[in-house]
Image (cartoon, rainbow, N blue to C red):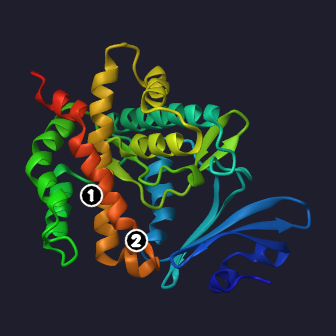
Amino acid sequence: MIPEKMLSFRGRFPDFEEVIGWQLLRKWSLSEVYRMTFATGNSRIAKWGGNEMAREMDIYLQLLKPLQIRSPQIYDCHKDFSGGFIVMEDAGEKDLEQQPFARYFIEAAKELARMRKTAAASLERDEIPMDIRNYYSVTSADFLAQLEELLASKALSDNPIIQRTREWFPEQLERLYREQPLTLVHHDFHAKNLLVQGERILIIDWSNAYLSPHLGDLYCLAKEASSFCGLTDNEIMDAYITEFWKEESSRDQLAWQLKIGGICWLIRTIKWLVYGGTDAIPGSEAWIPDLLADMEKLLDDSALTDNALRPR
């Protein structure tokens, strides 16, 4: 039986009538993902996204393809009042959450480096029109505005961690945008979105992606690598460096980027939760204290302070 969320797209995709099985892979209020199996034995992935999640089809067409980012093949897509619908390649059955082995986390760090290098080079060659580039770019001013929105919210108006971030972060952010090239940020670079393909990793679920220099993706990966299999930040950074840089002196600079990227990711994530995300995901308000604690840890990190004060 065709799932309810897919019914409104039935007329656009005649292949639906050939599907003999619908396997639910993920389901929450703004997204549903199914594996469609055909009588031939072939399978494809069908994904519905509502509200902001409906933008994923645009990201595939307007960012991933012109930037030459390795991603699942898209067979068809459509958007209407109910959301966006994508039929894509079935690129694998196991993700990094299901196979949380150290070698795969190391490979994920390398894949992230390759993705960011490819995107930065494509942007440098003006592979996407300027209006598309501007539309998907999140600027330093945008991050500072989001920080102000947190301080203006009822939930966090007096929060000392957000206040500290407001005082310290602008100078660091300005340096990041001045020194690092614009590239692609996935913004949900977690084990559940990293498919294992032999000894390589394929990044999926791009609905939150945008353009920025920050390295919040590596911050998220390092946290999960530690949690799942005990890898250290240095081990993840070294894997990233082997693909991105050749100079051994890059470790300190990358550690600074990791922390600044973490704060960028936290600002944007907490802001989404405070302004509607907790309504979309029941129980997610319980995430906010832990996210604030992570932000405080980054602010307290002596290595971050030392690098920030080092003469340039």
Q: Is residue 311 left or right of residue 264?
A: left
In the image, residue 161 lies at what x, y percent? 19, 57
Q: Is residue 22 left or right of residue 224?
A: right
Q: Label 2 is placed on what type of residue? A: Ala
Q: Is residue 5 left or right of residue 147?
A: right
Residue, disc 1: 267
Q: Label 1 is placed on what type of residue? A: Ile
Q: Is residue 200 above or below residue 13?
A: above
Secondary element at image label 2: helix
Can residue 133 be seen at all in this image of the molecule?
Answer: no
In the image, residue 153 lies at what x, y percent? 18, 75
In the image, residue 240 lies at what x, y percent? 46, 28
Q: Quadrant of the N terminus?
A: bottom right
Residue, disc 2: 286
Q: Is residue 253 above or below residue 176?
A: above
Q: Residue at x 39, y 45 (%)?
A: 184
Q: Quadrant of the C terminus?
A: top left
